[in-house]
Image (tube, helix red, strand yellow):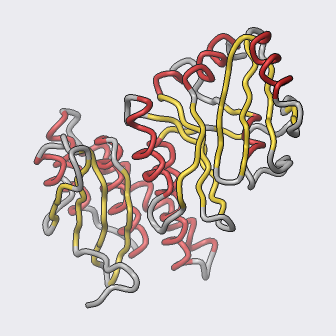
Amino acid sequence: MFNLTHVERVYGVMMAGSIPLHSGNVDKSVLLSVQGTLGTDNVHLLTCVDAKNGLVYYFAAPSKAFASLPEFSTALAAVLPSHPDHKGEGIYVLKLPNITVAVEMKVGELRLLSNDHDIMEEWLRAEAGKAIHDVSAFLPYKMESITGAYRRLADGISNKVSKYSAWSIAAGLTVYFAASVSLSYVNARADKSSQAHLLSLNDAVSQIDFVSPLSTQMAQLQKVSAVVVRAGGWIDEYDVKDGKEQFVLSMPAWVTKDYIEALGPGVTSDRVDENLIQIRKAAIKKSGTGA
């Protein structure tokens, strides 16, 4: 059972808001929006895309606040339009032993407030003309780190790739086993030192005798994901065409040459801003762009 004091500390450093929706990576866009306010790029997020209004709503908090709460969920997620308990505009309230937390929702705006019960009750009385919703019985949604969000994306890519062999469940299970053995081989071959580990991942993958194209693709993705997660970055695009890997990655500007070399030959990098670099291999063309 988690300590409610730790939960209250999380709400004390949490923020909520919204940004315009665009075609890029949602979690990355929110991160860039909140990292200055939170003072870190290591954050936990909960996001919701409101396509109807062209918005992304979010909750965000520094990841260090979750050190004692690896599985933190919040019923205040009911304020998000995609939530099954969403009641529209108004104030969503959660009472904890020592504090009250409230999130006010208007179209295009979220605002989170937390304070002692007396102070929050006085504020709520002043807002009595607005709909007020107690979320204590509502379904909580989990907040996750940027790394966790990346893993979710990587899992989605792996699932998409696996559809190439969906003609047979048995064949799919065989490929999964083969890929698992291959990845175990990668881990066994990889040196545990900081720089050699990255380079040996690339070298070990290239030496595996793969039993199917799918296992090759999964191992290639694992290689890229290992480097990206280690650096605290994320995958913007990943594809395999005619057996050749293509990707676009975003990584912190501090990454050294070793990280880039670990991604294999044919990789280029460009600085996006003072915090980010973009890394490409056989650049994937954006839809709507010319040749």
User: Which residue is drawn at the image coordinates 29% and 43% (left, top)?
Assistant: 188
Residue projecting furthest to the bottom = 291
- 241 left or right of 174 in image: left
Is residue 287 shown above or below 257?
below
User: Which residue is drawn at the image coordinates 64% and 47% (left, top)?
Assistant: 109
**Numbered circles on residues, count:** 0
Q: Quadrant of residue 5?
A: top right
Can you give x and y, in whole percent of width and height, for residue 40 in the image?
38, 31
One can see residue 137 in this view: no
One can see residue 185 in this view: yes
Image quadrant holding the C terminus, namely bottom left
Can you give x and y, in whole percent of width and height, for residue 55 in the image?
60, 59
Is residue 167 shown above or below 63?
below
- 55 left or right of 194 in image: right
User: Which residue is drawn at the image coordinates 87% and 36% (left, top)?
Assistant: 133
Is residue 246 shown above or below 128?
below
- 244 left or right of 193 in image: right
Can you give x and y, in whole percent of width and height, for residue 136 in the image?
85, 29
Q: Quadrant of residue 205?
A: bottom left
Q: Nearer the viewer, residue 176 or 92?
A: 92
Image quadrant holding the N terminus, namely top right
User: Which residue is drawn at the image coordinates 40% and 46% (left, top)?
Assistant: 32
Can you give x and y, in whole percent of width and height, for residue 220 in the image?
32, 63
Q: Nearer the viewer, residue 235 or 265?
A: 235
